[in-house]
Amino acid sequence: MDTTGNCILVTGGATGIGRRFAELFHARGNRVIVASRRRSALDAVVAANPGIVAMELDVADPVSIEAFAKEIVAAHPDLNVVLNNAGIMPSEDFLDAPNWLPTAEATIATNLLGPIRLTAALLPHLLTKPKAAILNVTSGLAFVPKLANPTYSATKAALHSWTMSLRRQLAETGVEAIEIAPPYVATELTGPAQAVDPRAMPLEDFVREAMSLLEAVPTPAEVIVERCRPLRFAEKNGNLEQIFTALAAG
């Protein structure tokens, strides 16, 4: 994909990975719309980055998605890139029955149904563009699950699979389907402690390395930074069980 000259929607764009992608795309001259449920966080992004547009969206709510899709296409008819980044990562204990089930359902609604529904709502519009792209943020845990976050890991594995099929079905169109799989990154996805965890990849390092991969010609189908490659290729390398156990212990 071209990384300049676009009109880009970034969901979950108020914080963390989404915000930094939005800011880097904005710095490259793209028109950027960030979407999130939290108005205060959106306002902070806009205040720090004049020119970025903010819109409220709850990706877990199909009614919100339907209304949002109509609004953004009307307000930004040049929209041609969607970065599905919004997500949650709660922990679950299957022995705590039945209290973990609502958490699992909410995770699926946000992490899997959210990008699928938003893609369904915006794909007819994207197909009218000569060059367009759908970028789905998955995780290294799509390839090796983390024991404490089983549904999160499962939603990312499902989104990886879904993106593969989306890419193949769109192969003869002008819409690219690209997967971005972060490793463990220093954000507040699981809480403030993650943002200062020395084991986490610095946010700036991750986003800049991922952006450099997106700028490659041709664009890779999967954007896998070096730090994530052990997870991505664990099964191929024959050490999936070893990494799964290490993640569980960590």
Image: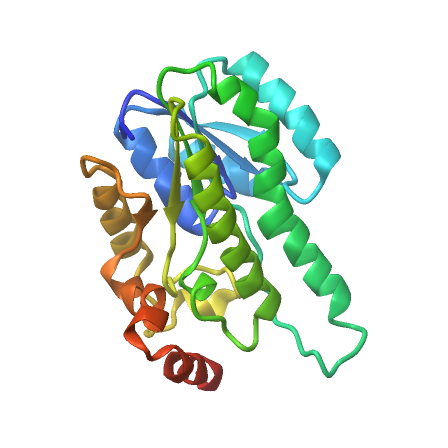
- Would you say 145 lies left or right of 171 here? right
**Front in this rendered view, residue 34 or 102:** 102
- Up the image or down, 88 lies above or below 177; here it is below
Q: Residue at x 59, y 40 (%)?
A: 116
Q: Residue at x 65, y 40 (%)?
A: 58
Instruction: Please tell me in which quadrant of the rendered image residue 122 appears.
Output: top right
Q: Is residue 56 visible?
A: no
- Would you say 101 lies left or right of 40 here? right
Q: Position of residue 148 (x, y in %)?
A: 56, 76
Q: Residue at x 50, y 73 (%)?
A: 146
Q: Residue at x 64, y 45 (%)?
A: 113
Q: Position of residue 228 (x, y in %)?
A: 31, 63
**Front in this rendered view, residue 46 or 159:** 159
- Up the image or down, 4 lies above or below 179; here it is above
Question: Which quadrant of the rendered structure holds the C terminus?
Answer: bottom left
List the single residue furthest toward the right: 98
List the single residue furthest toward the left: 217
Instruction: Please tell me in which quadrant of the rendered image residue 219 appears.
Output: top left
**Front in this rendered view, residue 170 or 40:** 170
- Up the image or down, 72 lies above or below 178; here it is above
- Would you say 183 lies left or right of 70 here? left
Q: Is residue 176 visible?
A: yes
Q: Position of residue 229 (x, y in %)?
A: 28, 64
